Amino acid sequence: MSPEEFRKYGRAVVDWVADYMETVEDHPVRSRVKPGEIRSMLPLAPPAEGEEFDAILRDLDDVIMPGITHWQSPNFFAYFPANVSGPSILGELVSAALGVQGMMWITSPACTELETHVLDWLVDMLGLPERFRSTTAGGGVIQDTASSATLCALLAARERATSFAANASGVDRPLVAYTSSQAHSSVEKAMMIAGVGRERLRLVDVDGSFAMRPGALDAAIRRDVDAGGTPFFVCATVGTTSSTAIDPLPEIGRICRRSRLWLHVDAAMAGTAALCPEFRWIHDGLETADSYCFNPHKWMFTNFDCDCFWVADRAELINTLSILPEYLKNEATATGAVIDYRDWHIPLGRRFRALKLWFVIRSFGVEGLRRRVREHVRLAQDFARRVAADDRFELAVAPPLSLVCFRHVAGDETTGRLMDDLNDTGRVYLTHTRLGDALYIRMSIGQANTTEDHVDRAWALIDELAPR
Ligand SMILES: *Cc1c(COP(=O)(O)O)cnc(C)c1O
């Protein structure tokens, strides 16, 4: 494709994207295809010779779009959002065009320096502890996902506990980690991948708001020490995936300090709320954490993938993940004057993700981001009031932020059927969770373009379809 052709088709694709933005609400929110339906429309063999670009664009509409679930629909209330925005898409486009491989400072200085700078901005924007700033012993890095950030934190914790022995058997006592029974599955996965073993993860009991009980954590640690184990890692959650429960960081931090355990805080979704000073209480106690992550690719209008991960002591992370083969040696690295982010995560190569984040922060402005987050929380609180006032429904808990979990009082079967009926209309998409023993519908309000009208219409539909 010549630059001239790129200009032509690039314009066509940008028009296609803008049309999609304008018409996203015309599609059923959740894709209706059956398993195998998309593949059945694809040719068995790839084309031997290049095809016309117009033909590819046609198939985008005819073959691909029926199999898309519209995460960018303002009627998408499922899971947690995976928002994009105009500035973010354009940042992604430029990043794709530059095709920079940012593994080291020398491989594109701007890729590293912009990332460091934007992550320092975010320390201010979210009111994070000073010790995460790059000008201290700590610092931040962009990872693909919260799952990867949690794995890196766990690996660094393992190295701390085993004094950087050649392998985890450097300690003769079994390592043990802790998280709440409501934590994300990525903690258990990290235990498997790190070779510590999922059976060494204690799922600590939660209170009535589904937040970790510090007393239960303390007791579990003492039990494991008495049994000859080596506690090494605690993952607390600020905003669980099921219900946005917020673990009490001050108490958990005190326990971790006393026993010298690595404390990682996973705020994948809820962290974005701290843009607003009135929601910063969610991070009370974060000053004692060794590491922290949140996902701008959820609620901060930045295309997937983009997870921001900070550590209080970057040397511990770098010593865990650094290997320097001959072919990567260079003067800038040798002088120690630069950051080489390849040592801050698992892969060697890395995309220029800071660009889209920079586009987003500059285009929205901090106040622009705050206004949207505030509005989502307000809409969710209003929605919760309506649910609570209707005696067909009950709330799981008073929603801390923008996720409302509710159920039909007639029980799991009626609740499940209501959710299926809602989703079958194609006009909304909601998903479920289990809290305690009961099934709940999750109404997650955080899609970039969701307004009061969308929430009103969703409520009207729920009101209409819920049995009386
Ligand atoms: C969404 C979520 C994750 C997983 O995020 P990825 O970036 O997809 O790995 C982890 N923890 C919590 C609390 C989440 O809500």
Image (cartoon, helix red, strand yellow):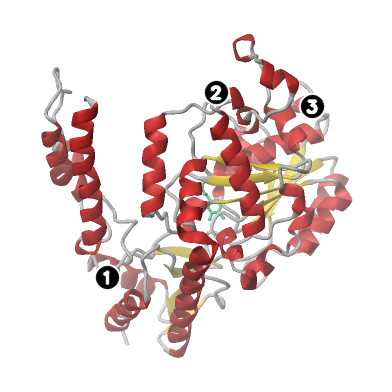
Q: Which residue appears at 61% of the width and 53% of the height?
A: 122
For the C terminus, the quadrant is bottom left
Distance Cα–Cα, label 1 vs label 2:
53 Å
Mark 2 or mark 3, which has the lower sequence index? 2
Q: CA distance from mark 1 to mark 3?
A: 54 Å
- The amino acid sitting under disc 2 is Thr
N-terminal of the pair, mark 1 or mark 2, is 2
Identify which residue, 414 or 251, lies in the foreground.
251
Can you give x and y, in whole percent of width and height, for residue 239 in the image?
Answer: 59, 62
Horizontal and vertical percent for residue 217? 77, 57
| Sequence-earlier tag: 1 or 3 | 3
Please identify, in this view, whether the residue under mark 1 or under mark 2 is nearer the observer: 2
Estimate how packed mark 1 is, as few (under 14), some (14 to 19) or many (20 or more) residues with alpha carbons within 10 Å.
some
- Image coordinates for residue 86, horizontal then vertical, percent: 36, 53
Q: CA distance from mark 2 to mark 3?
A: 29 Å
- Which quadrant would the N terminus be assigned to in this image? top left
- Whether residue 72 sits left or right of residue 19 in the image: it is right
Q: Label 3, on which residue? A: 164
Helix, strand or loop at label 2? It is helix
The vertical placement of 177 against 113, above or below, is below
Q: Amino acid at mark 3?
A: Phe
* Residue under label 2: 107
Is residue 317 toward the left or the right of residue 99 in the image? Answer: right
- Badges 1 and 3: C-beta atoms under 8 Å apart? no
The residue to which callout 1 is attached is 421
Q: Residue at x 78, y 63 (%)?
A: 250
